Image: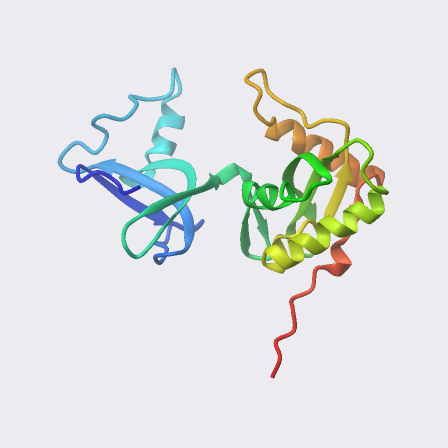
Amino acid sequence: GRPPDYVEVRIVDEAGQDREPGQDGELLVRRRGADPRKGFFSGYYKDPEATEEAWRGGWLHTGDVVRQEPDGSMFFVDRRKNVIRRSGENIAAVEVEAVLLELDGILNCAVTAVPDELRGDEVLALVVAHQGAENTEDLAQQIFQHCMQSLAYYKAPGYIAFVDEIPLTASNKVSRLEVRKRALEYVKSGQALDLRAGKKRPRVSP
């Protein structure tokens, strides 16, 4: 949708610089007029420092990554804390998850970041396969190739770990904190299949 007339918005990168239309960035909002905080939350309970941090620069930093098209329409991408930063590129976990769930062999999945010495972050996918699915290594290659065809190459999972279930919160949402914790353990223990060597920028024909 579009923001209402009484609200000002900005979409900025990690350095606080405004993004161009069509580019992803964090959504900043405030009320038009003399009182920019009017109608917003009054503050974090007994935490004035956190309140001022959220309102730094006179704008409320929502933590939502969005994209605004040239016609003014805005689209939600993901929460900022769920965005993977790989070699300077932003990758929304939910975008990769949506592509993974297109495959018949996948029952559920969750995508997160794991550290990478060269690229800062790498994409890891926890995958719950359907009962009776093919050999996991073959399925991992099928998943990887599907992502390479459906997404920009850098968004494809560099690691895939097959699990029995995806950790959930009490409200039945994906527990992103627990997903990241388990992902780190799978990489460290060697339980995650390492597919990073296949993540190469496609050659452009002359």
Which of the 4 image quarters holds residue 177?
Answer: top right
Q: Where 135 falls versus 164 (above or below)? A: below
Location of the C terminus (image quadrant): bottom right
Q: Nearer the viewer, residue 121 or 112?
A: 112
Residue in view at x 55 percent, y 55 percent:
89
Q: Nearer the viewer, residue 183 or 104?
A: 104
Which colour scheme appears in the figure?
rainbow
Can you name the residue that lies furthest to the bottom here?
206
Residue 17 percent across, percent down from the top left: 37, 54
Residue in view at x 70 percent, y 38 percent:
106
Total labels: the figure holds 0
Which of the 4 image quarters holds residue 191?
Answer: top right
Residue 52 percent across, percent down from the top left: 34, 30
Residue in view at x 77 percent, y 59 percent:
197
Q: Where 72 falls versus 179 (above or below)? A: below
Residue 165 percent across, percent down from the top left: 72, 26
| Left or right, residue 46 beside residue 202 | left
Residue 64 percent across, percent down from the top left: 42, 38
| Left or right, residue 61 beside residue 166 | left
Residue in view at x 68 percent, y 49 percent:
157
Location of the N terminus (image quadrant): top left
Q: Where 44 falls versus 117 (above or below)? A: above
